[in-house]
Image (cartoon, grey):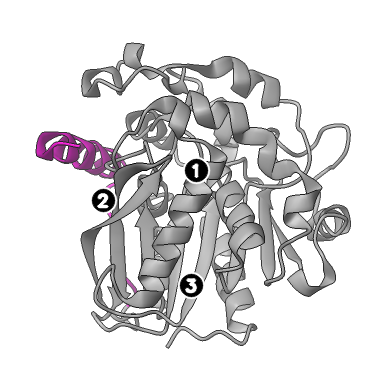
Amino acid sequence: MTKNAIVRALLAAGTALLLLGGLPAAPAAATTSTCRLVSVQVTVATQKTTLRGTLCRPGGRAPATVQLLLAGATFDQTYWLTPADTHSRPYVQYMTDAGYAVLALDRPGTGISDRPPAQDVTLSTEVDAIHEVVGLLRAGKVDGHAYRHVIGVGHSFGSSVLVTDAARHGDLDAVVASGFIHSVGPKLDALNQAIVPAAGDPVLGPRRPPEGYLTTTPGSRADLFLDTAGASPAMPTLMELTKATMTTGEQATLADAGDPSISGAVHVPVFVAVGQHDDLFCNGEYLQCTDAAAVQTWESWFYPADAELRTFVLAGAGHALNLHRNATDFFAAVRGWLDGLSLTAS
């Protein structure tokens, strides 16, 4: 990843935020956070790979707990940095205001992280890479502070990575899995059909994505990922400007995390959140995401008792929970759940 590529990626994110009027000011009672770009070196299929992200601390201090944020396929860290509208705080700001450190990390092959060969970027290799990141956070080798607690917070494929990491390595203290349930919705086929080579995309093509890097067809993202009635009118355009890539390796392994033996091996607290109108994974033959109780009943089949599963449904939202006007209801539910655990932000 060259300096120019990093600059282009950051400018694209900034342009998108301007469509919503920029970031809103934090409430008067909130502590100003400090954020900076960080990089960590990991191994992806034997290849040294640099992952990059935005790490924010509340008031510049280093609390005991950090949230490690991973976005879904064809999304990157911008997902966590984008406000739903001009009156909202994005997830990163909301949680730093609440006293948590957060690291919004670009997964291998996304955003401003390095881009290994497409066939090498799979669910399994990403899980191993994220395991390395968790160890570096605990050892103080990311920002000079050793975090006692690491909470994985994912969206969609990012949730798949974190749930699988918790099952395989047991290195997370808790997992928030948004946009990830063991079900199939009526729009999943449409998503599969909308995945095309990124080289021909008007947004991503100029960045020269390698062979095997994929994205969504132009203009498809709002229908796939939003309930537009619950989103800002600017959000569909924003989502197109900030689209990211996925790989053929990920495409081939997307469904692997749905294996019940994986979630069945998670032995830390899990919080599952979905949008009421997430038609990628809800509202099909198996599960209607009408409310948290319905999701709790269904997902309880897939997690052990010591996962202490809790569920949440964001009313009137599609797959990309953070990008709907009422996203702060989801953020508040996550914060309330974390406050109820033995983990603390400070």
Which of the pair 57/106 is nearer the observer?
106
Residue occupying the point 47% across, 22% down: 216
Q: Is the residue marked by circle 1 packed among few (<14), some (14-19), or many (20+) residues within 10 Å?
A: some
Q: Which mark is residue 125?
A: 1
- Say if mark 1 contacts mark 2, CB within 8 Å: no
Element on which disc 3 rests: strand
Look at label 2 and name its amino acid: Gly
158 w.r.t. 305: above or below: above
Of callouts 3 and 2, the N-terminal one = 2
Read off the residue under disc 2: 22
262 w.r.t. 62: above or below: above
The residues colored magenta run: 1-27
Q: Position of residue 128 (x, y in %)?
A: 49, 52
- Say if mark 3 contacts mark 1, CB within 8 Å: no
Which of the pair 153/256 is nearer the observer?
256
Read off the residue under disc 3: 150
What is the magenta segment's predominant secondary structure?
helix
283 w.r.t. 148: above or below: above
Q: Is residue 270 magenta?
A: no
Residue occupying the point 38% across, 28% down: 240
Look at label 3 and name its amino acid: Val
Q: Locate residue 339 relative to residue 13 in the image: left or right.
A: right
Element on which disc 2 rests: loop
- Name of the residue lying farthest toward the top: 200
